[in-house]
Image (cartoon, rainbow, N blue to C red):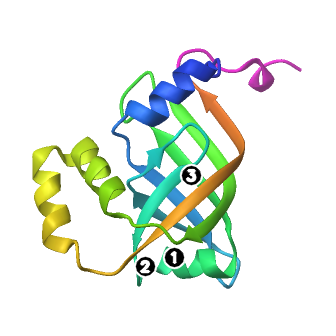
Amino acid sequence: MPPLTRQELDTFLREGKYVAKLATVKPDGAPYVNPVWYEYDGTHLYVIARARSQFLQHIREDPRVALCIDTPTPPYTRVLIEGIAEIIEQDWVEMGKRMALRYRGEEGLAYIEATRNRPRAMIRITPHHITSWKGGEWHRRYIDA
């Protein structure tokens, strides 16, 4: 399974409509996974959370996160990201509109407008380690002795 090239990775993260699975660390040390929409700017990933989301509280207590972003059908392209999340003071609405259009099309904008005044928080994730691969053959580390 070869890794994605830098260009393939950038395109996959910017243009794909794949829901990310965001893993945070619960207070007891157990993982907590939540599906999220995201936006990628070439350096950071952004997530907009409901203000009372459990994963938002986890990030406040421990900023370590991991994400899995993958295709649901063969040949299965996958990107795994480990990084640090931070809650930032930034208006979420414009980014929220872009995400809604990306994931739900025009009906997504109606969702944003209907929920615009509900409390949310913006999260910026700085990747520290990215692993990617596109389906097909096994990576040689799984078969070479």
Residue stretch rendered in magenta on the structure = 134-145
Q: Amino acid at mark 3?
A: Leu
Q: First in sequence, mark 1 or 3: give its number.
A: 1
Measured Cα–Cα span from mark 1 to mark 3:
14 Å
Q: Is residue 93 left or right of residue 13?
A: left
The quarter holding residue 51 reads bottom left
Q: Quadrant of residue 94?
A: bottom left
For the stretch drawn in magenta, what is the main secondary structure? loop
| Dot 1 crowding, Cα within 10 Å, few <14, some 14–19, many 20+ | many
Residue at the image point whose x is 61% and y is 74% from the top? 59
Q: Is residue 13 magenta?
A: no
Q: Which residue lies under the disc numbered 3?
A: 67
Give the side of residue 23 with respect to residue 93, left or right. right
Q: Nearer the viewer, residue 113 or 125?
A: 113
The quadrant of the picture occupied by the C terminus is: top right
Q: Which quarter of the image is occupied by the N terminus? A: top right
**Mark 2 and mark 1 residues within 8 Å of each other at the beta carbon:** yes
Q: Position of residue 25 (x, y in %)?
A: 65, 72
Q: Which residue is mark 1?
A: 56
Which residue carries the number 2 mark?
53
Up-down relation of residue 48 to residue 144 (above or below) = below
Residue 53 drawn at (x, y percent): 43, 79
Point out residue 2 in the picture as x, y percentages from the top left corner.
64, 17
All told, the count of numbered labels is 3
Q: Residue at x 15, y 66 (%)?
A: 113
At mark 2, the secondary structure is loop
Graded by Cα atoms within 10 Å as few (under 14), some (14 to 19) or many (20 or more), the crowding at tag 2 reads few
Three-letter residue code for mark 2: Ser
| Residue occupying image coordinates x 36% and y 29% | 73
Task: Check disc 1 and give the amino acid type.
Answer: Leu
